[in-house]
Image (tube, helix red, strand yellow):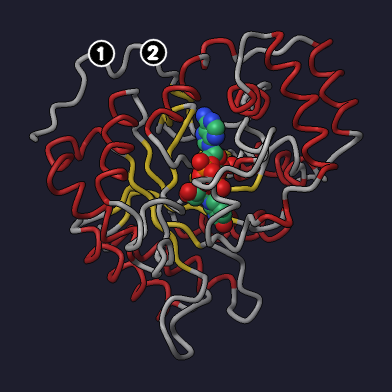
C-alpha cells in the first residue's frame, strides 16, 4: 500500500539544535542496528520506519556493518526508502558509518582513506542513495594517522557524498584533536555518537565537556541499555526479546538479578510519574538539555509510540534525580 506520511507529523516532536550547527535533530532518533537485517521481517521494519516518520522522527542511523549479515540493514533500509520515503528525502537525516570490520583483507575495516571512502561508496549503493546526510568515523583507529581519517571524512563532503561528518566512540583527547583537524580542513565536526544511559555514564567523564567546548552536538546511543531500562525483562526474558535472540551484545547472562533489582526500583519512579521505564530512561538522558538526541532501537512500532508518548514530560525534579542516583549507586553497572 502506498505510504502517505501523517499530516501532523511535526506537531509533537521536539527538535534540538546539534552543537553549534544549524541542523536540528529530533529529540528521539531511530537506529537500525537490530531488527533490520536480512534475517528480520522486512514488513516489520517497514512498519517501524513509517511509524517513526509519522511521529516526527526525521533521523535514521545506520552503519556499514549493521545486519546481520553486515550490510543488510542498509539494503533493507534502501529498499523501503525507495518505495516509501524517496519523496521525503529532504525531510530526512540519514547517517552511516565506517570503521568496524566489513569486508575481508586489510582495507575492510579501520580508518584509512582507502577503507573509509570505499565503505561510503558501498553504503550509498546498498541504500540506493546519492548522498548521506551524515558520515561517521565509527571508531578511533590508532594504526592510522588521525589526519588521514579526518581528511577522508572531509573528502566525502567535498565529493558531495555526505553533508556532515561525525565521530563515534572517540575519547575526549581523540575528539579534541579530530575536531581541530576537521576545522582546519573546513569541514567542522557536527556530532559525536556516544554510549550513554543511566547504566553507562562514561560520557560524563570529560567527553561531554569537550564536546560543548568544541561546539559538537551529542547523540546518545543505547539510552535504554539495550532493553534493560524498559519493562521487557522486569518479570522474565520474553521469547521475542533481544536477550532471547542471537544478539552478541545482550544475552541471557547479561540479565542479572543485580541489574533487574535496579531496573525494578527505577520502574517504581517511572510509575509514580505515570511513565513507562523506557520513557523515564529517555527523559533522564535528555534531562539537562545537553544531549541533542536519544538514539533508540525498537523491535516493534508500538515501542515507538510508547517512547514518544511522554516526550513533553522530560523534566525531572531534583528529588527524582537524587532518588535515581541513589538507586544507581554512583554510576554504571
Ligand atoms: P536501546 O538502548 O534503545 O535498546 C533498544 C531495545 O529496547 C529494543 O530493541 C527493545 O528491545 C527495547 N525497547 C525499545 N523501546 C521499548 C519500549 N517502549 N518498551 C519496551 N522495550 C523497548 O538501543 P540499541 O542498543 O538498539 O541502540 C540504538 C541505536 O544506537 C542502534 O540502532 C544504533 O543506531 C546506535 N548504536 C551505535 C553504536 C556505535 O558504536 N556508534 C553502538 C550501538 C548502538 P527488544 O528488541 O527486546 O524488544
Tell which of 139 and 28 is nearer to you: 28
In the rendered structure, the answer to whether residue 209 lies left or right of residue 117 reads: right
Q: Residue furthest bottom?
A: 105
Tell which of 266 and 16 is nearer to you: 266
Mark 2 crowdedness (10 Å alpha carbons): few <14, some 14-19, many ≥20 = few
Residue 51 coordinates in the image, percent (x, y): 31, 29
Q: Residue at x 40, y 33 (%)?
A: 23
> Would you say residue 294 is visible in this rendering?
no
Q: Residue at x 79, y 48 (%)?
A: 256
Disc 1 secondary structure class: loop
Relative to 123, does residue 129 appear above or below in the rendering? above
Q: Which mark is residue 258?
A: none
> Which residue bears the numbered disc 2?
12
Mark 1 crowdedness (10 Å alpha carbons): few <14, some 14-19, many ≥20 = few
> Which residue bears the numbered disc 1?
8
Q: Are marks 1 and 2 in contact (CB under 8 Å)?
A: yes
Residue 31 coordinates in the image, percent (x, y): 44, 45
Q: CA distance from mark 1 to mark 2?
A: 8 Å
Residue 100 coordinates in the image, percent (x, y): 52, 71
Disc 2 secondary structure class: loop
Q: Quadrant of the N terminus?
A: top left
Relative to 295, does residue 148 appear above or below in the rendering? below
Q: Quadrant of the C terminus?
A: top right
Q: Residue at x 34, y 23 (%)?
A: 55
Tell which of 127 and 279 is nearer to you: 279
Amino acid at each position: 500500500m502506498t505510504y502517505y506520511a501523517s499530516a501532523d507529523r511535526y506537531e509533537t516532536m521536539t527538535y534540538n539544535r546539534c552543537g553549534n550547527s544549524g541542523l536540528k535533530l529530533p529529540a528521539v532518533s531511530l537506529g537500525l542496528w537490530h531488527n533490520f537485517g536480512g534475517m528480520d521481517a522486512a514488513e516489520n521494519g517497514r512498519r517501524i520506519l513509517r511509524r517513526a516518520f509519522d511521529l516526527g522522527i526525521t533521523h535514521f542511523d545506520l552503519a556499514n556493518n549493521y545486519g546481520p549479515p553486515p550490510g543488510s540493514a542498509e539494503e533493507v533500509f534502501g529498499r523501503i526508502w525507495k518505495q516509501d520515503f524517496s519523496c521525503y528525502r529532504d525531510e530526512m537525516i540519514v547517517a552511516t558509518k565506517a570503521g568496524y570490520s566489513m569486508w575481508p583483507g586489510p582495507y575492510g575495516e579501520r580508518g584509512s582513506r582507502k577503507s573509509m571512502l570505499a565503505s561510503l561508496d558501498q553504503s550509498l549503493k546498498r541504500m540506493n542513495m546519492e548522498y548521506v546526510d551524515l558520515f561517521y568515523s565509527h571508531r578511533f583507529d590508532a594504526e592510522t594517522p588521525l589526519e588521514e581519517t579526518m581528511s577522508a571524512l572531509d573528502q566525502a563532503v567535498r565529493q558531495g557524498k555526505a553533508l556532515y561528518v561525525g565521530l563515534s566512540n572517540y575519547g575526549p583527547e581523540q575528539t579534541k584533536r579530530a575536531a581541530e583537524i576537521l576545522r582546519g580542513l573546513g569541514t567542522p565536526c557536527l556530532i559525536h555518537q556516544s554510549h550513554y544511559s543511566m547504566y553507562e555514564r562514561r560520557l560524563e567523564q570529560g567527553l561531554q565537556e569537550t564536546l560543548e567546548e568544541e561546539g559538537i552536538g551529542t547523540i546518545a546511543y543505547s539510552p535504554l541499555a539495550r532493553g534493560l531500562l524498559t519493562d521487557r525483562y522486569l518479570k522474565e526474558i520474553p521469547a521475542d526479546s533481544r536477550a532471547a535472540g542471537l544478539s552478541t551484545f545482550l544475552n541471557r547472562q547479561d540479565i542479572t538479578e543485580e541489574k533487574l533489582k535496579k531496573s525494578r526500583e527505577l520502574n517504581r519512579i517511572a510509575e509514580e510519574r505515570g511513565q513507562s521505564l523506557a520513557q523515564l530512561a529517555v527523559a533522564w538522558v535528555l534531562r539537562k538539555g545537553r544531549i541533542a538526541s536519544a538514539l533508540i532501537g525498537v523491535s516493534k512500532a508500538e515501542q515507538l509510540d510508547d517512547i514518544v508518548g511522554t516526550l513533553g514530560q522530560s523534566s525531572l525534579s531534583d528529588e527524582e534525580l537524587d532518588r535515581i542516583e541513589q538507586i544507581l549507586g554512583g554510576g554504571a553497572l
